[in-house]
Image: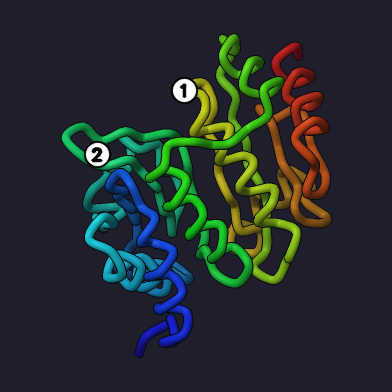
Amino acid sequence: MSLLNDETRTQIKEMFQELQKPVKMVVFTQEFECHFCAETRQIAEELADLSDLVTLEVYDFVADKAKADLYGVDKIPATIILEDGEQERDYGIRYFGIPSGYEFSSLIHDVLMVSEGDPKLSPEMTSWLAELETPVHLQVFVTPTCPYCPQAVLLAHKLALASDKVTADMVEATEFPHLSQKYQVMGVPRTVINETVYQEGAAPEQMLLAKLKEAVAA
């Protein structure tokens, strides 16, 4: 049974007409003991069916451990959005947990953004990222029912696209309760920067930049 209805498929197909460079989705799943793995895989399969410029590779988290290590995948389900072509390019854009509900829109916009190759950030943020020498890891905790979460996820993923020093994860809070507890996630979205600095809510770019500077200086 399809997860996407005909209307949604038609809308996405039209959006994917704007795709420029080929995009690859890499999904890590597991046969057993993985909540939402099957659904995450199916979402990616149905999206890949909507454009010749979108392809999909699926790996088993246990059996394909070398691939999981290569992509830095330590939990599942995991979805990675890559620029495809003669040479694959991994920008550090990750989804841990099912990209459903409001986060489904984040996934669609990420495919379009990676294909276009333009994060459309402010000149100030672009300039700061160009001079960034310290690795930055963002974890954006979300839930599928949070309408403000995609804004935070997409901004984090824009930073990852813009800089090789930045990696950015969407983390579905209810699927990884141990991480939600570790980072004291009481509300979403909550962005964790380099394990030490926190940003509550869907912060505008300028506010997140201040937090990024704080994290890098720590």
Residue situated furthest bottom in the rendering: 1
State how far apart marks 2 and 1 are (Cα).
22 Å
Residue type for callout 1: Asp
Left or right of residue 4, residue 120 in this image: right
- In this view, the residue in front, 32 or 119, is 119
- In this view, the residue in front, 75 or 143, is 143
**Relative to residue 113, is residue 42 depicted above or below?**
below
Q: Residues within 10 Å of mark 1 (few under 14, many from 20)?
A: some
- The picture places residue 186, in percent across and down from the top left corner, at 83, 55
> How is the structure coloured here?
rainbow
- The picture places residue 70, in percent across and down from the top left corner, at 30, 34
- In this view, the residue in front, 12 or 44, is 12
Residue type for callout 2: Ala
Residue at 56 percent across and 57 percent down: it is: 106
Disc ID at residue 66? 2
The residue identified by callout 1 is 164
Residue at 43 percent across and 59 percent down: it is: 77
Residue 33 shows in this picture: no
Residue at 23 percent across and 48 percent down: it is: 64
Q: Earlier in the sequence, mark 2 or mark 1?
A: 2
- The picture places residue 88, in percent across and down from the top left corner, at 25, 35
